[in-house]
Image: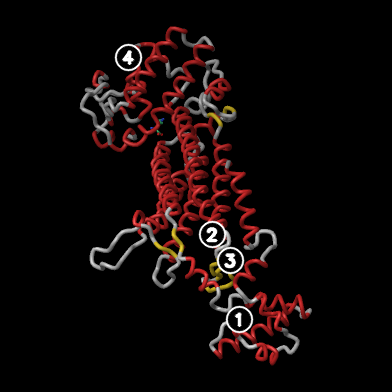
Amino acid sequence: MTHQKNAINKQTDTSKGQSIWGGRFGAGPSAVMREINASIHFDQRMYREDIAGSKAHASMLAKQGIISAEDYTAIHTGLDQIQTEIAAGKMHFDPALEDIHMHIEARLRELVGDAGARLHTGRSRNDQVATDFRLWTRGAIDQLDKLYIGLATALLDQAEKYAAAPMPGFTHLQTAQPVTLGHHLMAYFEMFARDRARLQDCRKRLNTSPLGAAALAGTSFPLDRHATADALGFEEPMANSLDAVSARDFAIEFLSVLSIGAMHLSRLADEIVLWATSAFNFLELSDSFSTGSSIMPQKRNPDAAELVRAKVGRIVGAQNGLLIVMKGLPLAYSKDMQEDKEPVFQAVDDFELCLVAMTGMLADFKPNLEKMKSAAGEGYSTATDLADWLVRVLNLPFRDAHHVTGAIVKTAEEQGLALTDVPLTAMQAIEPRITADVFDVLSVEASIASRVSYGGTAPDNVQRAIKDARKVLS
Ligand code: ARG
């Protein structure tokens, strides 16, 4: 909470506990009531959006002849000054004034008197807060997209470097077939591209304006809701005033998108943790993204990756929390909805940090190519290539080829040999028509190069995918 000494709002008379809405109240609220009621310690983050919304509203009021041009000028100038004051940390935030909307309005009245008191004509805090929150979330999406571009670029740079570098591909975390490291990294590019698209989808759906819905029923003043929607960059005004003030599905959708995105980041983070173990030894952790142990001098811990892996818990928790706040709320506004902002702010902070940390880890990414390559050849990883050869050259039905290959792998296992070292005669004992040509397909490189089907791991494919991805990014 920001508590500045140089109180600008001190002239606002809250000494008798009267607030802006206190007309019909005798005594003021209790201290506990003030504390539970106040949201200023978090919703001050929306001050720019609140001021932008007020400017749009005031300008429309003047154009519609609801307030005078002089009042509009005074309001506009006052709001500019307040924005400067808050940005400079000069606003004293007082829980008695509840939230950012009342702080700004109270200060405006101090600065410009009656003109300031006319600003709230045809408006309620209910449509005001819904507007501010949509604007804030829209801004967060735009900021996240920028960070995603940085992440995707770091990923593409590494994928390009290692487009032909072999590593084992896994299923069930068992060695399955060789792939290239570039291909593996590009899988994450695809996930991130979908995450970005989901953000844009969410942005499009949330970009409608609640402003002018007033408390819940609309207003008797001749507002031009299309004009305020336009001025704030919204597609259109929301069609139903009750929905406008009470809808929070945009925030829940946004948190769902972040949950999915965080889950993807967590999977990549987990691979970094796994690969950096001495058992895997696929990866050298950089000094900038690892820490030592206080007791074991030899240790290097992948803390940053572990924390990115963990943050998904907080982000999914935020989504869950807001869903639970909203379920069962009757129309229209309920104060419960004040609890909508903290989970979103927290999730955005966490998510931004994850994106930046992951970008840094990828930029520092130092794979152990030798280890990856030798691991790619272990575990009979080219057994499928052998089966495919039997289908292609000997015209065996795939199921039979699978069976023959299984028998050859068994022999290799019994003799402690890699597939490439099984003598031709031993293979022929199982399937007499096998020729020495079969060895051409059994190396890791040959296996990888053969995977030319669309989306497959052949280095040419990977290079093409990277080229296409760069086009999409720019
Ligand atoms: N601080 C409130 C919130 O975030 C603003 C709306 C208050 N509206 C009301 N009717 N009390 O939800």
Q: Do the numbered discs 2 and 3 sit on residues whose CB atoms are within 8 Å?
A: no
Which marked residue is nearer to the observer: mark 4 or mark 3? Answer: 3
| Residue 263 in picture, x, y percent from top left | 48, 55
How would you rate the neighbour count of disc 1 (Cα within 10 Å): few for under 14, some for 14-19, many for 20 or more? Answer: some
* Real-space CA distance between mark 4 and mark 3, rounded to the nearest whole angstrom: 67 Å
Q: Quadrant of residue 224?
A: top right
Q: Quadrant of residue 409?
A: bottom right
**Image quarter of the C terminus:** top right
How would you rate the neighbour count of disc 2 (Cα within 10 Å): few for under 14, some for 14-19, many for 20 or more? Answer: many
In this rendering, position of residue 47 left or right of residue 17: right
Residue at the spot of label 2:
162
In this rendering, position of residue 130 left or right of residue 202: left
Indicate which disc, 1 or 3, sits on the residue closer to the N terminus: 3
| Residue 407 in picture, x, y percent from top left | 64, 87
* Real-space CA distance between mark 1 and mark 4, rounded to the nearest whole angstrom: 84 Å
Local SS, label 2 = loop
Which marked residue is nearer to the observer: mark 2 or mark 4? Answer: 2
Residue at the spot of label 1:
420
Indicate if the residue with disc 1 has its beta carbon within 8 Å of ligand 1.
Answer: no
Indicate which disc, 1 or 2, sits on the residue closer to the N terminus: 2
* Real-space CA distance between mark 1 and mark 2, rounded to the nearest whole angstrom: 25 Å
* Real-space CA distance between mark 1 and mark 3, rounded to the nearest whole angstrom: 18 Å
Residue type indicated by callout 4: Leu
Residue type indicated by callout 2: Tyr
Residue type indicated by callout 3: Val
Q: Nearer the viewer, residue 434 or 139?
A: 434
